[in-house]
Amino acid sequence: MKFLVSGVGGDIGQSIANILSGYYCEAEIFGSDIHNDFFPGDIYKDIKLLPPVTSPAYIDRLSEYLAKEKINIFIPTSEAELRWFVDGDVDLNSLPSHCLMASSKAMKIGFDKFLTSQHLAANGLPAPWVSLASHSDLGAPEIPCILKSRAGSGNSSVFYIDDYEKSICFQRAFPGYIWQQFLPLSSGEFTCGVYRCLDGSTRVIAMRRRLSSGVTSFAHVVNNPLIETLCVNIAESLDLFGSINVQLRLVDNDVPMVFEINPRFSSTVGMRHAIGFSDVIWSIEEQFLRQKVSPCPSAWPDVKLGRRYQELCKYE
């Protein structure tokens, strides 16, 4: 099979390419990105520079490359691309390759943090309160709280607000953001891989994580029935098929409270694959090969996972 993985300058793209290379011995892996300021490694047959999704030429250049290289499966990993595909209601059947991603409803809701909160509340699922900063000019509705971007993931656009006057200043600076209830970190933060099969069954792996620069650098796998049941209910409420990532904290007698849903493959995709949560492979089996999904462990080992960094240099 031939794969095109986009965003290979980032951690998710590199992890997925490594998974494909290790699992499919005869795979031909192509990569793409909007820049070449990274070390691609030797697993790619070719790296293609493509315009960003904000360019009118994006879809034509992408389609041309997919057709030229006879790519079987295109795996977009950058959030900008995924948002473009779902927000623009792009006809994926018009692409010359199969596009591997989560189902449309899950992406439309998950990529909007305000819609995510409304969806969880409407389905009776525990989540912090959320309100639009633009609904009022009176500052935060509660102190302390969080002010965060309505779109996007990571911690670069998240602010802890512990003062009323501070909240007024931040509200004026970021009127398109949302207020969100502050959830204490006393019981840890969890990132949960959630994969829902085409037969309606759901697979969950929960990991207590440590963040470094907005990325999970260390994780401890846990088996928590409350978390697993909540993730299954979220997947069903979204009519999910494919893979998403649920972020939560435990509050008030260890009740799991979801503060974010990332409707895409996660930055922990490589860690999870190493112990059998192979959501990339399962997606390929079900969505492209039309096969029955591979087995999954019934419980996860008590294991710690992490990533380490390597410095590289290249002389011109």
Image (tube, rainbow, N blue to C red):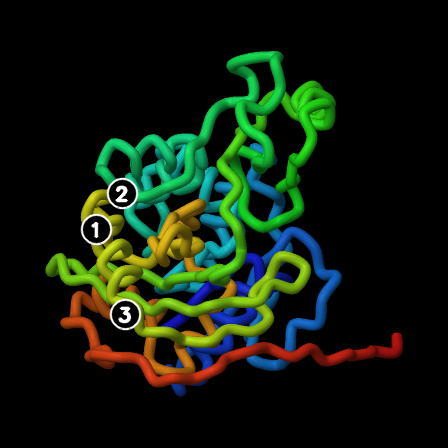
Foreground of the two, 261 or 37: 261
Q: Residue furthest front?
A: 253
Label 2, on which residue? 125
- In x, y percent, where is residue 122? 25, 32
Q: Is residue 186 above or below residue 61?
A: below
Q: Residue furthest right?
A: 316
Tell me which residue sits at (47%, 38%) in the image.
84
Classify mark 1: residues with Cα within 10 Å, few (<14), some (14-19) or many (20+): some
- In x, y percent, where is residue 139? 62, 19
Foreground of the two, 123 or 34: 123
The three-letter amino acid code for the residue at tag 3 is: Trp
Tell me which residue sits at (42%, 69%) in the image.
207
Mark 1 or mark 2, whichever is nearer to me: 2
Q: Quadrant of the N terminus?
A: bottom left
Find the distance from the CA under tag 1 to the CA under tag 2. Answer: 8 Å
Q: Earlier in the sequence, mark 1 or mark 2?
A: 2
Q: Earlier in the sequence, mark 2 or mark 3?
A: 2
**Secondary structure type for disc 2:** loop
Q: Earlier in the sequence, mark 3 or mark 1?
A: 1
- In x, y percent, where is residue 7? 57, 58
Q: Is residue 116 above or below residue 297?
A: above
Label 3, on which residue? 282
Classify mark 3: residues with Cα within 10 Å, few (<14), some (14-19) or many (20+): many
Label 1, on which residue? 233
**Secondary structure type for disc 1:** helix
**For residue 214, side relative to residue 3 (left or right):** right
- Evaluate whether residue 246 shows in this view: yes
